[in-house]
Amino acid sequence: MKKNYDLFNTFIIQIKYNMNKSILSILTIASLSMTAQVKPKPTTTPAAKTAVKPAASTTKLVETVTKVGKEIVIPYKKYVLANGLTVVVHEDHSDPIAYVDVTYHVGSNREQQGRSGFAHFFEHMMFQGSKNVADEQHFKIITEAGGTLNGSTNSDRTNYFETVPSNQLEKMLWLEADRMGFLLDSVTQKKFEVQRATVKNERGQNYDNKPYGLVGEKTGEALFPKGHPYSWTTIGYIEDLNRVDVNDLKRFYMRWYGPNNAVLTVSGDVNTAEVVKLAEKYYGSIPRGPEVKNMAKQAATLTENRYISYEDNVKFPMYKVTYPTVASMEKDEVALNVLGEILSSSKSSPLYNTFIKSKSSFSKCYNYSRELAGQFEILIRANAGSKLSDIEAMLNQSLADWEKTGATDDDIKKYKINYQSSLYEGLTTVQGKGRQLAAYQTYANNPNYLKIEMANNLKVTKEDVMRVYNTYIKGKFGVILSCVPKGKSDLAAKTDTWKMYERTIEEENAKYKNLSYTEPKDIFNRSKVPAAKAAKLVPLPNYWTSNFKNGIKAIGINNNDIPKVNIQFSMPIGHRYEPKSGLAVLLTALLEESTQKHSAEEIGSILERLGSDVSFFANDNEVSDLCFFIKTKFRFNIKNC
């Protein structure tokens, strides 16, 4: 029997040990059906609207991908509606849940100089009601249906997603379609002002008033040339938000939020033919928007090191060096990702040994590739009073020492097996699979890009890693940022060699002119909230039990969807059993360190080679050990977990 569970997704042993007795309990989950009663928003008469009749169905099946044998793949069918909307459907009937994702290929990279923050601002507006959904009802409808929801904006795309009981699927498709095709009537000046204030507060909370909050913004300004889409952050500048009005935002919506610039992804306990039929019903009459072309790659280039610094309300000075690299899905991206992992991800890595083991600072490094360009960042947060010039010298020496051996076969082996482990973990839920399909379609026009991604990661070599190190890092120019405590400018790595330019405020681009809102016309009553189907009971899994000679009881579930094993070992020695408060948490912290046989670094290295992760946690009742590992390493891990 095939099952799929969010917490215990593959093969599970849950062991509860007690010196005197063991208790095995099975929880039954009840599924409830709730139909939200929503008062339709009063209609208003918008200016200059043209009604169009829905065209006859010309939906095309573009591609069908199925699983063959034990290959790692997300099966799906891909369709394109007459208006250009791409629909990707993945069926997984393990549990009665469905994931709905609408991704628009528009992020802050589509904005103009002096008009930043539009994409993120509009994400907020999309939750404020539409023609047939009353104000503030979007969250209410979904939560009352037993679901969860959110939206997010980055530099390259904006997405909206819900996870609900599968009997609520039609309602979710209706909701997303209403804000795709009927939003502008509800975008009022009052709502605009409320959300503008909300975004300003968000910027203050997460950027301006947060320790180290401006590090990313200042790095982007110095790394990318003036006018580059990545030279500003997704949140935008306050002065740009103050400058715009509600009509600017409406035109941004009309330009980028058409169905031909969107991907509707549905995964879970659904029927593909039914999903397509519902997509045609709710989305088919929405007119096609202006054509959208992919943007050209725009890699950053530097002709000298750019030292910048700023004072912040922090205690610990931070050093960060950023090098220009390649865009996502380009040839060298994977090798750069591996380089970041080798340099800082484990307790045996050079940066860990130089900065963290010596207790002098915190460090990490990573490659960050986006749709148009990439950057490789090394970040070190030093102890209070540390001079960042000394930190820079320590970093340079650490890299020079590492170069003597460079990337090894063992490094590559550890990376590949941990990549697979992480990948498999992302494919254990319908949410994870749906997100992957949506992202691959948006960026690669290929929901099956997983196959290419896996091949690229599993064929990387140590020679590739050293080549990208020499091409993009060693001896290359970067942006070196110092974030120092207020009044401590002397701690900066060097005197600034680059200053922020005066920002250009562009006039609205011609592509926003002559846009008009065309209201869809339907042959059904769109204001009526779709009723939920009968709820399904959650099917309990087939499980096995075993009694060990020492009194331990085990319970397990078999799942062959992915080649990964999860084990949880639990003991009733939590907080309530403590003779002194805090002992349980202290115990779990110590269990993740060294043993009599192995140092913490040795344990970390062993786990990396196995693609494994071991963690301990304590609550009121239990101390638990969680082990995750690749199935091929089962015998070793079960022995040492």
Image: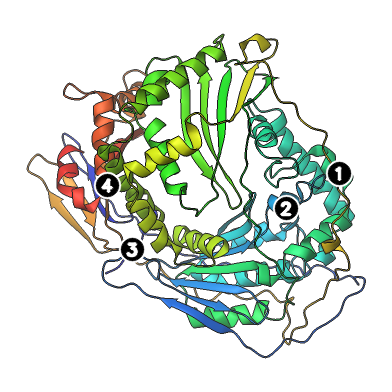
The residue at 81%/42% (across/down) is 197
Q: Dot 3 lies on which element?
A: loop
Labels 1 and 3: the sequence-earlier one = 3
Identify the mark at residue 505; answer none if there is no mark.
1
Residue placed under numbered mark 3 in the picture: 72
Q: Dot 1 lies on which element?
A: loop
Q: What is the crowding at mark 1: few (fewer than 14 residues within 10 Å), some, or many (at least 20)? A: few
Labels 3 and 2: the sequence-earlier one = 3
Residue placed under numbered mark 2 in the picture: 119
Residue placed under numbered mark 4 in the picture: 629
- Of marks 1 and 3, the one in the foreground: 1
Q: Is residue 292 left or right of residue 431?
A: right
Whole-number angstrom distance, CA of label 1 to CA of label 4: 53 Å
Identity, as a three-letter code, of the amino acid under mark 2: Ala
Instruction: Give the quarter of the image for residue 626.
Output: top left
Instruction: Give the quarter of the image for residue 624.
Output: top left
